[in-house]
Image (cartoon, rainbow, N blue to C red):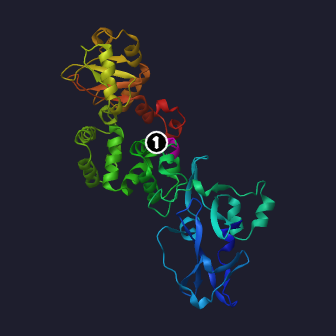
Amino acid sequence: MFYLSKLLGDTVRDVEGKIAGTLQDVVVSTRQKYPRVTTLVLKRGNRRLAAPWDTVASLEESGVLLRVAAGSLADHTPQAHELYLSGQVLDRQIVDTDGRKMIRVNDIQLTRSGASLRVVAVDVSSGAIMRRIGLARVATRLSKNPKPRLIDWSAVDLQASDSEAVRLSVPRRDLSLLHPADIAEIAHELTPEERAAVFEALEDEVAADTLEEMHPAYQASLLSELPDEKAADLLEDVSPDDAADLLADLPKRRASRLLALMDREKAAEIRELLTYPENSAGGIMTTAFAVVPPEVTAAEAIELLRDQEPEVETVYYVYVTDKRERLLGVISLRDLLTVPGNRRVRDFMTAEPISVNLAAGEEEVTQTIAKYNLLALPVVDPAGVVHGIVTIDDAIDLVLPLAWKKRLPRIFR
């Protein structure tokens, strides 16, 4: 077994015993599951020379011996499907799916396989850093667990992003299996460029859920780093109220460009929300809510709800409206599922449900939700037309600091 850090800087001698240079990097082919070393990159003065693996007679931590003369080595030229272990992997970030956090590649483990030398794992332990600066023995004495913390190379996805600054330890399809809150915490630890690279790798729906889980201070910064098309697609999958809040934090020109790229109906909803004062019920509400007419049966209402479900914020309440979209009543999901399927909605709905006006302030909204133990509160205009709902998670945002909000079960977020 070798560690890359123990090889870098080694003196390389040619077949005549003359110094050919110092080992600057190790190049591997990415065509194999465990990449095979193809070339050693030597530094000699201002030149970077390539020593193909078949010219290497001996490679040890004490030094490297070539089977050719130094004068026969040519300048190194990068090739397709090759990776520089020091330049592109060492000290880069990967995602630890077990610990659900960002960790850094502190060293790389290689092993002999017949005549080949292959990469088998990355070492993410703090002891690897001590090893690199020549304090491995000190680390062994001080640490209760001096063993390397190795991640198998097969778990490293080198194509996870176009950014050399971030290397994800799982393919993007597996990264999407992490909880959005975990991905958000990982993203918080990255640079803006790395953060954008991670979001480029995520499925649209997962990316949107992750964005909603992120701290507000990072959300606008992320959108600023993404291309317009990607940012617009992301906003389309975010709830309208959150999308409006995000656009309000962007420069007006950028916000206008993103709205122009979005689905016309979704953009219209967001534009409406942007017209209301930020701290009013209209500014807090979401326009994604479930509605049914009063004359349909419970069975028909369930079918309508199934059609609407992908676009609505919550299905705990279904609002009953007339042809002019005036609020007539509300039914709970429990009532809808337990009443006979042939019963008309108007016969079991709760008439004249609690609501607030578009201009209602934050205090009135939160007090109303708390007083009546509501999961969502409809917002109406003076004519009784329902324009949106304020969900309990929106109300929690108004009264609780983010750190406390994160401790709540997801149902309240």
Q: Where is residue 307 in the image (x, y as percent from the top left)?
A: 31, 27
Residue under numbered circle 1: 213
Q: Where is residue 401 in the image (x, y as percent from the top left)?
A: 49, 39
| In magenta stretch: residue 245 | no
Q: Which of the pair 275/59 is nearer the observer? A: 59
Which amino acid, by three-letter code, is at mark 1? Glu
Q: Is residue 72 visible?
A: yes
Could you tell me which residue is drawn at 38 percent across and 25 percent down? 315
Could you tell me which residue is drawn at 48 percent across and 79 percent down? 77
Q: Which of the pair 64/135 is nearer the observer? A: 64
Q: How many marks?
A: 1
Residue 43 picture quarter: bottom right
Callout 1 secondary element: helix
Q: Which of the pair 27/303 is nearer the observer? A: 27
Q: Can residue 355 be seen in this view?
A: no
Is 253 positioned to the left or the right of 207 in the image?
left
Q: How crowded is mark 1: few (under 14 residues within 10 Å), some or many (20 or more)?
A: some
| Residue at the right extreme of this rendering | 141
Q: Where is residue 258 in the image (x, y as percent from the top left)?
A: 28, 50
- Which quadrant holds the N terminus? bottom right
Main secondary-structure element of the magenta-colored stretch: helix
Is 224 positioned to the left or the right of 257 in the image?
right
Q: Which of the pair 246/358 is nearer the observer? A: 246
| Residue at the front extreme of this rendering | 114
Q: Where is residue 181 in the image (x, y as percent from the top left)?
A: 50, 42
Residue range corresponding to the magenta coloring: 179-183
Q: In this view, does 295 lie above or below 259?
A: above
